[in-house]
């Protein structure tokens, strides 16, 4: 009798014997492996596949069944919620990668020298400009010394 029963014997509430064919395949330290294979294929199918094989073939078959069952376990065909969640998070992950890359590129670029120019000073005039301006023009009269005031609008 083993001190640590294999996961198959623990699942069946049995005592694990020394010549248990599942002891090397599903040790008690590797719960995930048995859980995935059992949920997808079932214990009867697993026993059917492994009963006529040699110990080395059992190890390879168990690995193969695990690698086939894991994608089905993570993304079941009728409930692809994890797959959809990954697709929805994809743009955010890429945006984070772009920002990290920009920061990395900024650290590699040479520092540019920016000359600080003084800001122009604007002053307000105290008098308000009138809407109608009065300006002086020369008239085309014979008397060139005469100046008349014209209002522009």
Image (cartoon, rainbow, N blue to C red):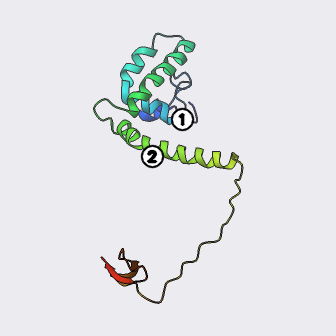
SS type, badge 1: loop
Residue 56 spot, x, y in % from top left: 57, 13
At x 35%, y 83%, the residue is 149
Depth check, front residue: 135 or 52: 135
Query: What residue occupies the far left of the structure in this picture?
Result: 78
Q: Earlier in the sequence, mark 2 or mark 1?
A: 1
Q: Is residue 87 above or below residue 115?
A: above
SS type, badge 2: helix
Report the mark closest to the observer, 2 or 1: 2
Depth check, front residue: 106 or 18: 106
Q: Is residue 102 visible?
A: yes
User: Residue 92, which numbered label?
Assistant: 2
Residue 90 spot, x, y in % from top left: 43, 40
Q: Is residue 134 above or below residue 15?
A: below
User: Residue 28, which numbered label?
Assistant: 1
At x 46%, y 30%, the residue is 34
At x 42%, y 79%, the residue is 144
């Amino acid at each position: 009798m083993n001190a640590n029963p294999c996961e198959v014997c623990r699942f069946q509430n049995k005592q694990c014997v020394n010549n248990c064919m599942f002891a090397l395949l599903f040790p008690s330290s590797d719960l995930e492996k048995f859980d995935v294979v059992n949920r997808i294929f079932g214990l009867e199918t697993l026993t059917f596949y492994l009963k006529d094989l040699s110990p080395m073939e059992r190890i390879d078959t168990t690995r193969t069944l695990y690698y086939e069952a894991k994608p089905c376990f993570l993304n079941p065909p009728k409930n692809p919620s994890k797959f959809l969640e990954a697709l929805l998070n994809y743009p955010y992950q890429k945006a984070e990668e772009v920002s990290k890359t920009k920061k990395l590129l900024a650290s590699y670029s040479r520092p540019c020298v920016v000359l600080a120019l003084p800001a122009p000073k604007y002053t307000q005039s105290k008098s308000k400009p009138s809407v109608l301006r009065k300006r002086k023009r020369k008239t085309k009269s014979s008397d060139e010394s005469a100046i008349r005031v014209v209002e522009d609008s």
